[in-house]
Image (tube, grey):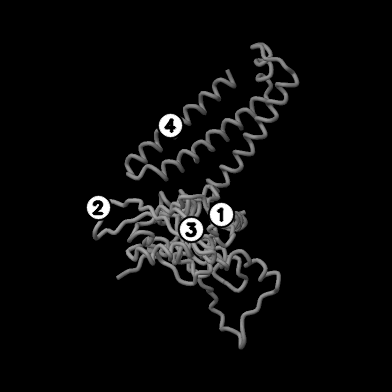
Amino acid sequence: MKFSIYRFNPEVDEKPYMQDYDIELAPTDRMLLDAILKIKALDDSLALRKSCREGVCGSDGMNINGKNGLACITPLKDLKEPVVLRPLPGLPVIRDLIVDMGQFFKQYHSVKPYLINDNPPPQKERLQSPEDREELNGLYECVLCACCSTSCPSFWWNPDKFVGPAGLLQAYRFIADTRDEATNERLDNLEDPYRLFRCHTIMNCVDVCPKGLNPTKAIGKIKDALLKRSV
Amino acid sequence: MVKRVIVGAHYGLKDWVIQRVSAVVMALYTIVFCLTALINNKFSYQDLHQIFSNRFVKITTLLFFISLLLHAWIGIRDIFMDYIKPTSLRFLLQVSVIIALSGYGIWALLILWS
């Protein structure tokens, strides 16, 4: 199978370049990550992040034939040859397929992605009704792979100001949580032409999310919550 | 060291709502206008003059133009916010657009009530 992979080692290369590989695959090589690891066995200078190899850790996000995704859960049989692999767009490249996720996590941290409740915790746990718990489905599953935010043009232009789809999905995850008591502060934090309203419903995030989540819908619900609060 | 607290600028919601509402107003006006024009099938200067001398038509048309100008302002401002980084240039462009759009608004008003 033919591959064309983005290569850049800032210590050696002046400019990034694309390197071609042609490898024999075994019938057991089903996912893109299997193939990349085979390439890495031949050329150990190729750098990439990976860990759980089953779409849970979110490490191996990359741009696959022009679309962001996780290499470990992308079936090889669906890919057109040559498979063009590039690092996630919009973030600084550290080396080959590894990007600096600093900006992405800065935005994630800015939404305070943890439960805020100053009441003393009950003996066992804070309970929710099944209906209230239902509201968190489609929000908590995010693995922070950054596929969505790095496919969002609004995040490309303003990564320092726009929270991005991943951060906003997490923001809504805690706004929607009935155990959380900081809803107002959270909405204050997001009521901003850049932080929230840079989203122009382009929906690239929905298109690429490897976990099948819908950040655009969550962003819409944040806007609804803001509207409800103000009328 | 004082740690900078990240908070929202506390605006943006109104602009977003205005853009949505103005879009609905423009869509309704356009549909109703096209339908009545097609049904009546009268396009001579005299016919149009008669239609637009009706006060109700004048007011709804003015509402359409106000929606159009607000919608355009928010849209263009968003584009400037994305692409024009130097503050002075962005400010200059925003002021020019406000002046131009206000001019168009007054022009529309003069045409409708002339």
Viewer-nearest of labels 1 and 4? 1
Are the residues under badges 3 and 4 in a single subunit?
no
Q: Secondary structure at mark 4?
A: helix
Residue type pointed to by label 1 = Asp
Dot label at residue B99: 4
> Residue shown at 49%/27% (left/top)?
B104
Badges 1 and 4: C-beta atoms under 8 Å apart? no
Q: Which residue is mark 1?
A: A78
Q: Which residue is mark 2?
A: A14
Viewer-nearest of labels 3 and 2? 2
Q: Is residue A39 above or below residue A51?
A: above
Question: How far is mark 1 from mark 4, CA to CA?
Answer: 54 Å
Please tell me how crowded label 4 is: few (under 14), some (14-19), or many (20+) other residues with Cα within 10 Å. few
Chain for disc number 3: A
Residue type pointed to by label 2 = Glu
Tell me if residue A198 can be seen: no
Question: How far is mark 2 from mark 4, CA to CA?
Answer: 48 Å
Q: Which residue is mark 3?
A: A147
Q: Is residue A166 above or below residue B17?
A: below
Residue A108: x and y, percent?
46, 64
Residue type pointed to by label 3 = Cys
Please tell me how crowded label 2 is: few (under 14), some (14-19), or many (20+) other residues with Cα within 10 Å. few
- Image position of A102 (left or right of B27): left
Please tell me how crowded label 1 is: few (under 14), some (14-19), or many (20+) other residues with Cα within 10 Å. few
Q: Secondary structure at mark 3?
A: loop
Residue A62: x and y, percent?
45, 58
Residue B38: x and y, percent?
72, 21
